[in-house]
Amino acid sequence: MAQFLQTVVSGLALGSIYGSLALALVLIYKATEVINFAQGEMAMFTTYISWALITHHGMSYWPAFFVTLLIAFAGGIGLQTVVVRPLARASVLTVVMATIALLVILNGAAAWIWSPQLQFYPSPFPTSSWVIGGVHISKQDAGTFGVVAACVVVLALFFRFTKLGLAMRAGALNPAAARLMGVRTSLLLALGWGFAAVLGAVSGMMVAPTFFLTPNMMQAVLIYAFAAAVLGGLESPVGAVTGGVLLGVMLNLITQYVTFVTPDLQLPVALGILLVVLLIRPSGLLGRAVVRRV
Amino acid sequence: MKKTFLLIAAALAVSAVIVVTAGATSSATPGVTAKSILLEGTFPLSGPASGYAPIPVGMAAYFSYVNAHGGVNGRKIDFRYEDDGYNPANTVQITHKFVEQDHAFALVGGLGTEPQQAVRDYLNQNKVPQLFVSTGATTFDRDFTTNPWTLGWQPDYEAEGSIYGKYIAKNFPTAKLGILFQDDDYGNDYLRGLKAGLTQQHLPQIIDAEGYALSGNPPATQVAKLKASGADIFLIFATPTPTIQAYVISTKLGWHPAHIFTNSVSATDAFLTIAKKSGSDNTDGTITVNYLLDPANPLYNKTPGMKAYRAIMAKYAPKANANDGLNIYGVAKAWTTVQVLTAAGKNLTRAGLMKAARNMNFTVKAKKANPYTLPGVDVRTKGNYQFPIAQVQLVQYQNNTFKPISKLINGRGA
Amino acid sequence: MRRVTALVSFGVLVTAVVLAPTFFTHYRLFQLALVAVYLVALLGLDILTGFTGQISLGHGAFMGVGAYTTTILVVDHGWNDLLTIPVAGVVAGLFGLAFGLPATRFAGPYLALATFAIPLSFIGLLKRFPHFTGGGIGKNLPQLHSELGLHMNPSVWFYAVCWMIALVMLPLAFGIVRGRFGRALRAVRDSEIASTANGVSTATIKSAAFGISAFYCGVAGGLYAIGITYVNPDTFPIDLSILLLTGIVLGGAGSLYGMVFGALFVEFIRISWGPTILNGISRVHHLDTHAPGSGLVVYGLILLVVLYLAPAGAAGVVRRLMTGRSTVAGWSKPRSTTPSDPATGVEAP
């Protein structure tokens, strides 16, 4: 039983990380109908910035954390303006390709600027654990979970109770109508990228103490974040986080208890389950059901 | 109908042109002029394996140093390297370019088991030396009869594993072993070596071995299983990132095995420091092996090799982080290359180079030991013995640095 | 008119292919042979993505299935390598069909992300069953050698084989996208709802398109294995699938001749152009051209610049030069002018 709970607990921490990046994906998808393949590398790059602030500029953790969030916000808006907006009239496929180009550039640039060597990244939380009934709950994992949860709550409040949040929701739901109502949709799209970049930065800075900082740190996370976003429904922020947590726990349980599933089969099995879910619910667990008007 | 006709015409024309253009190659030694020798190699400068990028930097620095001091038998070494991103399909194409377009004299230091495996047949068929590949896979040393143009350099993974096995059988004959290994040829080479070293008698000491996949998550469940198995010696045969993760996870789980053995690729000062900073209290006491001077270890600061290394790096690769052991790996490998080129003589041929590489005697006894390896390490090949470096020293991590705990041991029993 | 253009284009391509060996070195011919390999793969993917409107991020894995089929037949069963090519195509095609049948239920981005799972799972499966696939260390094939009693340079032989196959597969692709079946494909792309209403079974059409595209990729994969003479999981990374999609976009989705440009880009960008440009820059600015990551930055920037200059790919540029108009069918339709179905992301007609 302790072993089972241990597996679940470590899955929760991992899952919250998937969930936060999945949430960033969903934000951009809802605003622009584009899957942002550069989301993981944006997160990685901003994490490097925070690392440079801490290591080379002598900042302590939390100031660096918040400065990085600001930089990420500006960076997200900047990328949308410079890279994505000029392609506003191109096809979805072309825009997706531009985000892939961005992925490649950011990955290369990080290695170029900061070297591809593995770097130590500090965690704001202690490494010690609480022991409850034989289950070790690491304070670091609990902290990660808490930070991600706080982000989700802040974001939800923002969209629910602020004018800007409402405008963004309207812009995503029906761009043409929103434009007619006097909402500046192009600004909203840029803001959407800004918020996604902030979320990505959070997940990057939470990943780094466990995965360690390298230019490829987020690539595996991005794949699971994709899966989490699809599992929860690409349209649903709550679904993205739920999907992430479910995936994290499920993966850990499978590795622990199904002996046929060697580590190499972990990913295929997870994706297989995902496909089955999609077959039953083509728009994910919490996505709106698609009514095919036929 | 028209299309079919076009097709047949095209096919005929293609074949006709081909027959006309098939030409002969020149007989002079490719890549060697009166003034220069062209050496080339593929390395991952992008992607997940790009952490190894300092190796060619160290090699290039040493070749520049040699060139500034007159070169090899009056010829300057022109060393070029390109990025294959650790994708064998890229390695194959770039290697074709090295051989057919650039006419490299030899390929030196090419990195990675799989990428080098992918081009081995091609290079052997074209009789191009594939020297000192940067991998410890046993096949590059052992299978020299089928691949006469290929040779490794560093101690092989299997031999390293067997040294751990022998040490454990002798010093901890009743301990229970739990192993975390990368579930591929790299990890399995170590595992095989370990079992051979333990011998049949001590094999039951292994009570659990957990594999993980390179692309996967941190090995949290695996380490938890190993802890639950009751093992008191933890062996980690992994690449750097999962190794550091294993240290941190074991601490988080409150597991403090009596001894930890970690393979040499991952147990460097840099990686263990990261593990320690990340909160692991398990790094002290880690046992691994070493065969090179370690620039991060003050123990070797006074040796002539380390002084020469620092001077070369400062002058020819000033931007590089000279404390990274991968640079000295590159320098030590380039030193060996220069020795072999010198031994191959003024009248340089590919066959002559291979002959020199198959009969290396850069040993303490011959007063020609590699200054960048640990004192006493020989670089030696002869006849059926083609494991250039086989001696290693067991070292233990204490107070942020490694201390030798054994004499040099030859992992190949020779 | 269109028929004449098509025939002239084909003639130009064939002439270029025939004349190339007189101008290029053996190494360049080896690269151009791989261009033919990528061309075959891109033709297949274009039938699915450009003509049927289904984005796939997984077709590198179907190349992998073809490559492993060829490898296992040649290495473990002693087949002649050329004879394995059709088998490689069929096996990959069956895999494609098997994936396409359920996948037809997924729309737009869900499908794209579902296809992302194919190469990832493929790599895991290869490693899980090493006795069959060779595991992580993979399998070596025999070195390139000319066959049929000819004594050619191996690279030239490979060039001839690849282009002969590509020049069969290209007209075949034209045959597929023209005619009734082709109209059905485009109907699914342009409006799934309308085509269903008109009695076209979208599920059947989509899975058929999946099967055909995978068949093309399988043929390409078989050739790839013969040329690279080695397969292992690292040879078919997710990057390969993305690279194929890049080729489609840069060639011009929905144009078959555009794929020739796409294939040239795919082959030369990383191996040749990137390093050349970097070396050029280093002469001016003394940059360290071997700095890790620098190659990726250059590659990404080139990709981005090309996307801006030619958002509809090479085919879009050609069409603009020839007609003076920039309107291109299908995928290149401006997004913001047509309201789209918010749930599926599928554009309204």
Image: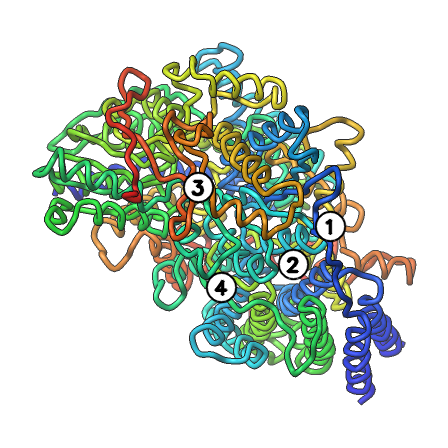
Labels 2 and 3 in the same subunit: no
Q: Residue placed at 55% from the left, 59% from the top? A: B124
Q: How many marks?
A: 4
Q: Is residue A161 left or right of residue B365?
A: right
Q: Amino acid at mark 4?
A: Asn
The answer to whether residue A220 is left or right of residue A3 is right
Under circle 1, the secondary element is loop
Q: Alpha-carbon neighbours of circle 3 within 10 Å: few (<14), some, or many (≥20)?
A: many
Kindly identify the residue that appears in the image at 51 percent across and 67 percent down: C141
- The amino acid sitting under disc 3 is Val
- Percent position (x, y) of residue C248? 68, 59
Which subunit holds the residue at mark 3?
Answer: A
Q: Are marks 1 and 3 on the same chain?
A: yes
Identify residue for label 4. C140
Q: CA distance from mark 1 to mark 3?
A: 29 Å
Q: Nearer the viewer, mark 2 or mark 1?
A: 1
Spatial distance from mark 4 to mark 1, Cα to Cα?
A: 43 Å
Marks 4/1 in contact by CB < 8 Å: the verdict is no
The residue wearing badge 1 is: A90
- Mark 4 neighbour density, 10 Å: few (under 14) some (14–19) many (20 or more): many
Instruction: Tell me which label, 4 or 2, sits earlier in the chain.
Output: 4
Q: Nearer the viewer, mark 4 or mark 2?
A: 4
Residue A148 position within the rendered picture, expressed as x and y whole percent measured from the top left: 39, 31
Which amino acid lies under the numbered mark 1 shown in the image of this protein? Answer: Ala
